[in-house]
Image (tube, helix red, strand yellow):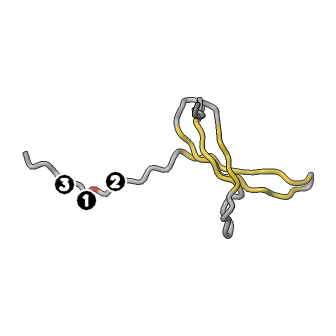
Amino acid sequence: MAYEQKPGDIIVFKNKDKQGNQPDYRGNGLDLDGKKIELSLWIKEGAKGKFMAGQIKPEYKPESNQADEVADPF
């Protein structure tokens, strides 16, 4: 049985090919409304020790290039 995400679920993986200031971990999930999200996490060092800080963004969707679309003349 394949894993199926439910609203509020996330999956995070270690970024094995990290370069520069890329996140240490990346992942995806579903927000509480069931919309797809992307996660980025960095390991930080603070006064109380190591912790993770991150960002949550809506799923990246490339914009379609309207010049490539052919309009139907009829």
Q: Quadrant for residue 1, please give it.
A: top right
Q: Residue at x 65, y 39 (%)?
A: 10
Give SS at disc 1: helix
Q: Is residue 66 above or below residue 32?
A: below
Give the CA distance from mark 1 to mark 2: 8 Å
| Residue position marked by numbered label 2 in the rendering | 64
Task: Provide residue 68's location: percent of width, then percent of height.
Answer: 25, 59
Q: Label 1 amino acid?
A: Asp
| Contact flag, marks 1 and 2 (Cβ < 8 Å) | yes
Q: Quadrant for residue 9, please give it.
A: top right
Left-right relation of 57 to 43: left
Q: In this view, does 21 lie above or below 53?
A: below
| Residue position marked by numbered label 1 in the rendering | 68
Q: Residue furthest bottom?
A: 20
Task: Provide residue 61's location: percent of width, then percent of height.
Answer: 44, 49
Give SS at disc 3: loop
Mark closest to the chain's N terminus, 3 or 2: 2
Q: Residue furthest front?
A: 1
| Residue position marked by numbered label 3 in the rendering | 70
Left-right relation of 50 to 25: right
Q: Which residue is drawn at 71% across and 58% down?
A: 24
Q: Which mark is residue 43?
A: none
Task: Provide residue 28's location: percent of width, then percent of height.
Answer: 60, 44
